[in-house]
Image (cartoon, rainbow, N blue to C red):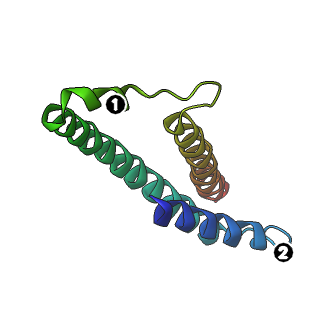
């Protein structure tokens, strides 16, 4: 998961470095498409990993000593779940990349209607 977040941060850093100069059409399109793809794949990997984790916990719970079942019921209070934090992060990145892709298509549409 951290590989995907690192990739998104690198793409965002490339975009942020290009902002002071000028965001070119090709840069917006390339970063937007790559960012959207990385975010979608990352979200899929996160979802799949959660399914494996749930299955693993189910198997571990079924095989453990009945006296040890309490360890599977531990809840941490007053702390947001990691899944919520990752969902917010993915949504923020997806929104950023979607805006870049929309900007790319808007510029293409403006250029196509000018001529």
- Per the image, the residue denoted by label 2 is 21
Q: In this image, 101 relative to 4: left or right?
A: right
Q: Residue at x 49, y 26 (%)?
A: 75
Q: Residue at x 68, y 72 (%)?
A: 14
Tag of residue 41: none
Quarter of the image containing the C terminus? bottom right
Position of 63 relative to 27 (above/below):
above
Q: Nearer the viewer, residue 114 or 75?
A: 75
When asked about the image quadrant of residue 21, the answer is bottom right
Mark nearer the N terminus (2 vs 1): 2
Tag of residue 72: 1
Q: Which residue extends farthest right?
A: 20
Neighbour class for label 2 at 10 Å: few (<14), some, many (≥20)? Answer: few
Neighbour class for label 1 at 10 Å: few (<14), some, many (≥20)? Answer: few
x and y percentages locating residue 28 in the rendered image? 63, 63
Q: Are marks 2 and 1 in contact (CB under 8 Å)?
A: no
Quarter of the image containing the N terminus? bottom left
């Amino acid at each position: 998961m951290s590989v995907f977040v690192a990739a998104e941060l690198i793409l965002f850093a490339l975009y942020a470095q290009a902002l002071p100069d000028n965001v070119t059409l090709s840069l917006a399109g390339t970063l937007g498409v790559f960012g959207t793809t990385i975010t979608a794949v990352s979200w899929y990997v996160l979802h799949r990993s959660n399914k494996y984790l749930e299955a693993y916990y189910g198997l571990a719970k079924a095989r453990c000593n009945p006296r040890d079942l309490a360890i599977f019921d531990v809840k941490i209070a007053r702390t947001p779940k990691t899944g919520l934090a990752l969902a917010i992060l993915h949504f923020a990145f997806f929104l950023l990349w979607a805006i870049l892709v929309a900007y790319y298509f808007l510029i293409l549409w403006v250029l196509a209607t000018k001529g």
